[in-house]
Image (spheres, helix red, strand yellow):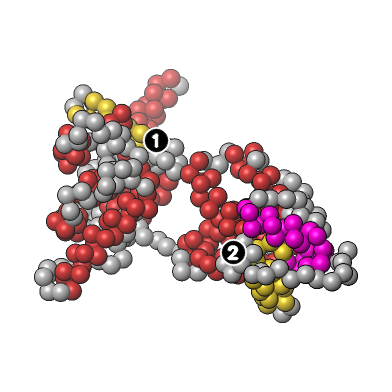
Amino acid sequence: MVSNSKKTRIAGVHRVKKKLSCGGLRTYHYVFRGGPKFWSDVCDYDEADPQYVLDYQAALTGTRVKSKISGEATTYYIDRYRSSAEYKRLKPRTQSDYEKYLKSFEEEFGVDPIKMFEEMEAVGQIREWRSKWSHSPKQYDYAGSVITTFLTWCVEADSAITVHYHKDQKKLYSSNRAQIIWLPSEIEMLLNEARPQEVPIVIAFSEGGLAPQDVGFLKREHVQMTPKGRRLYFRRQKTENAVSLPVTEALGQLIDSLPEDQELLVTSLTGGPLKALRASQVIRDIKLRHNAKVDAGLLPIRIRDELRPYDMRGTAATALLRAGCSLNEIAVTMGWGLRHASNVIERYAALVPEVTDEVHKKLVKAKRKAAKLERKKSKKDKKSS
């Protein structure tokens, strides 16, 4: 019940009114401008209630107290979700990705009752929260997917709410980059522009088609001897799929040139651990420096602006296809499942037209072999009869 006693306004509190998609208004109070939200008008108490001051103090100090609202606060159910079997069975990398958005969602809606998400109007508020990633359609969509997953868990697994409407949200990001691969000449341009400490990062990306999160993960222990050389054997950070990557001449030179006391095969530019985002940024920085020289008339050919570091995985897959590697060999080398490898290679095959003749030759050979076996079986059946 809302208190009728005189309100005591706390100095510094930032009060915001937001228009809902249904046309109504909702009021939010923040500890300060840009600070954490601690109250909204869906709470069943106002500024005159002692609970208002308690929530303000809790948000100000970064601590949590049980909020006196209609039902448990959303933060309570976010904590329950983090402890759930559904969340714990996610791969560590996925959990890390989820946590970025769950934490932000908690800062925005944590003190609000979970029941508010049973209202259609909540969809508009979630969209407004997601708008902080409007500069990146991919992140905007991922934020929505994480919250849809959380709210669906609240309905189906925890029964915290009976329904939610944040479903089937239109995606902003769509991309089929199968036909975007780095040309050998563009890799060479990167290497020519790269500074000495950047070269290992370019080699790690381009020689093995490593994903950004795997580049800085590799250590000496992942290098194994084989009867005819060496290989890098590890499990991908994102999928945990095993990868068996041949050590090429360039990778071999990189490994052999490492200081004796260095365990990581590729480090940051300052010699420390290399994070995925930073690894990708280094490639982008080199490309920008090269293209800046082209724009200044110092170099003749640009590296295409649409190329991204991750596109080097497609480049590596195409190189394996050109080399005549089997589907299984490509899957093992790239750390893909066979089904995924089949789908990817089907898209990349169009980029390797010379493979068509070889595929036709193999199909003819297979049909002849099947026909021969059928004739033998037919003859055997006739003799037995």
193 lies left or right of 271: left
Q: Could you tell me the amino acid type at mark 2?
A: Gly
Q: Position of residue 203 (x, y in %)?
A: 22, 47
Query: Is residue 334 on the magenta stretch?
Result: no
- At horizontal 82% and vertical 63% (from top left) the residue drawn is 49
- Could you tell me which secondary element the residue under label 2 belongs to? loop
Q: Which mark is residue 87?
A: none
Q: Position of residue 117 (x, y in %)?
A: 72, 61
- Mark-to-mark CA distance, 2 and 1: 40 Å
Which residue, as the protein is rendered here, is positioned at the far top? Answer: 384
Identify which residue, 212 or 182, lies in the foreground: 212
Q: Is residue 187 visible?
A: yes
Q: Position of residue 85 (x, y in %)?
A: 64, 38
Choose mark 2 or mark 1, whichever is in front.
2
Magenta stretch?
A: 40-62
Q: Which mark is residue 35?
A: 2
- At horizontal 62% and vertical 53% (from top left) the residue drawn is 62
> Which residue is the site of mark 1?
235
Query: Is residue 53 on the magenta stretch?
Result: yes
Q: Is residue 317 visible?
A: no
**The C terminus: image quadrant:** top left
Q: Is residue 177 above or below residue 269?
A: below
Q: Could you tell me the amino acid type at mark 1?
A: Arg
Q: Position of residue 123 (x, y in %)?
A: 67, 67
Which residue, as the protein is rendered here, is positioned at the far bottom? Answer: 23
33 lies left or right of 271: right
264 lies left or right of 90: left
Q: Is residue 198 above or below residue 237?
A: below
- At horizontal 57% and vertical 67% (from top left) the residue drawn is 34
Q: Is residue 207 above or below residue 15?
A: above
**The N terminus: image quadrant:** bottom right
